[in-house]
Image: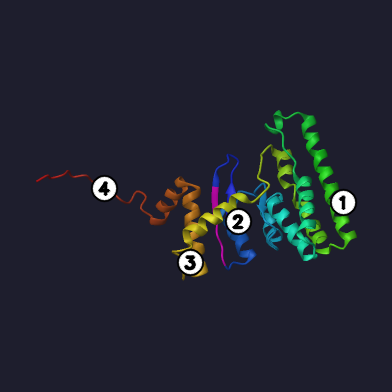
Amino acid sequence: MVLGVDDRGDLLGLGAYSGWSWTEIREDLDRLRGGHGKARLLISDGEPGLADNLAGLADDYQRCHWHALRDVGYSLWRDGLLKPVRDPERRRLKGILEIQLPSGSVESVAKKDRRGILSRMKQAEQGLDKMIADFERRGYRAAAGYVRSAQRHLFGHLRLWLRTGLIAPRTSSLIERWMREIGRRLKRIAFGWSEEGAAKMTRIIIKHLASKEEWERWWQRKMGIEGKVMLVYRGVHVK
């Protein structure tokens, strides 16, 4: 499922897919965006292949921080570490990633505050480098590989703010909430549907939930009744 947010903060329901190749999804999203150029930022979990295939639709890519914390714990579990050892490392990563943006637009934020963000990003990158080196030294190969692959995509939201002043989420929690809502709506009625049928219904639901106005325009186009129907009131007869 793909959602968008425009510069005004309005939500856009872009699509839902099942059984499509990454190439087909990318081409469909290009069509839906109508040649408006790249998005500013793609935000997603760490699904293998997703960023490689869809990141070209956006200027930058942001890996969800919530998933990063969860997945580094899973990677440490794969390395054979018990929970008392995994949890401090997850908290360590959380501390590295927590960088608070100043309030206000870029134009109104003092240069020293922007320099502070750049300095904090550099420190975070160094912290990730040290974490990778520590994991490798201890033989935590799965965890080291995970952090290394995620590292360059963990601060896309900060780079966007520094370029434009727009504040973007650093997690994919919005789409996670929508997926739960879609699941709640389809769980009972969609029993026995094909995957493509459920995907089509999902596209209808997200269009309705995201924008009532777009929903109305979509139905007008779908039914093709614009300017073709005339209703005439001829009065009421009461017995």
Question: Which tag is nearer the camera, tag 4 or tag 1?
Answer: 1
- The residue that mark 3 highlights is 197
Task: Return the residue nearer the eye: 76 or 67.
Answer: 76
- Above or below, 200 against 93 in this view is below
Q: CA distance from mark 1 to mark 2?
A: 39 Å
Residue type, label 3: Gly
Task: Give the residue drawn at x 74%, y 58%.
Answer: 73
Give the residue number, with chain letter if any, for mark 2. Answer: 30
Residue, disc 4: 231
Q: Secondary structure at mark 2?
A: helix
> Position of 179 compared to 128: left or right?
left
Q: Amino acid at mark 4?
A: Leu
Residue at the spot of label 1: 130
Q: Is residue 117 left or right of residue 232?
A: right
How crowded is the residue under tag 2: few (<14 C-alpha within 10 Å), some, or many (20+)? some
Q: What's the CA distance linking mark 4 and mark 2?
A: 39 Å
| Image quadrant occupied by the N terminus | bottom right
